[in-house]
Amino acid sequence: MCAWLTPQARRHIALRAAEAAEIAEEAEVPAEEVSRHCARSELYEYGVYEAELRNQSHAMGLPHHAPFLDNQVVRAAMAVSVREHASLTVQKPLLGAALDGLVPFWLLARRTKGSYSGNACTGIRRHAAELRELITGGRLTAEGWLDGDAALRELERLAVGVPGRFAALEAVIAAELWIRQQREETPHGTS
């Protein structure tokens, strides 16, 4: 989404970031605690995606399992020192150690991930009209935060399958939907 911010929005965010940085300089937060917080945030974000995928799978009568998001598994992983979660030479060393002998070695040793780009392009193509309306009629564009034309150009590229900024478009969509939800929940006459 940052790629499509208007110059005015960029200036505003830069000022806010500078103010936050000044405050942060005064706070003493150990690096390990920052890493643990980042891990929790990523876990939460992944859990939200996985919950939606589970709901969609169940709605279609398909089985869906996410054993790594089981509460006991998550608690056990988070109890391990952050230093043991990462490695410069091995992908996901903690997961590999836990699954050694249970999962084929070639799967644990792989260096690439699967891609959902095809599914994302299909979804964008099927819902392009609604997404265009969300961008052109959205608050981010109306209030001068988002360069709607730039976001629409990227939407059109993604809709025809050209690789692009899926995450940025997703951030715009999520922000607009969140704003709509907040406005619906706020009683009329208040902001």
Image (spheres, grey):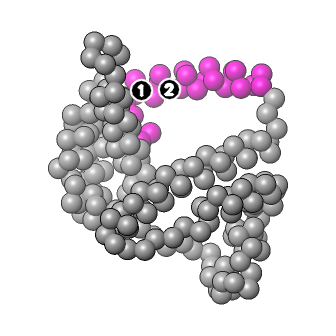
Residue 139 falls left or right of residue 25? left
* Residue 21 picture location, percent across and down: 67, 25
Residue 69 falls left or right of residue 35? left
Residue 141 falls left or right of residue 107? left
Toward the viewer: 173 or 64? Answer: 64
Please give the residue where the numbered disc 1 appears in the rendered image: 9
* Residue 39 picture location, percent across and down: 67, 50
Question: Which picture quadrant has residue 5?
Answer: top left
Toward the viewer: 112 or 76? Answer: 76
Was residue 17 drawn as part of the magenta stretch in this picture?
Answer: yes
Magenta residues (range): 1-27
Question: Which picture quadrant has residue 136?
Answer: top left
Please give the residue where the numbered disc 2 appears in the rendered image: 13
**Amino acid type at image mark 1:** Ala
Q: Looking at the rendered structure, which numbered label has been put on residue 88?
A: none
Q: Secondary structure at mark 2?
A: helix
Instruction: Inspect this view and state whether residue 140 appears.
Output: no
Do the residues bearing badges 2 and 1 touch, measured as CB atoms within 8 Å? yes
Toward the viewer: 63 or 13? Answer: 63
* Residue 69 picture location, percent across and down: 60, 61
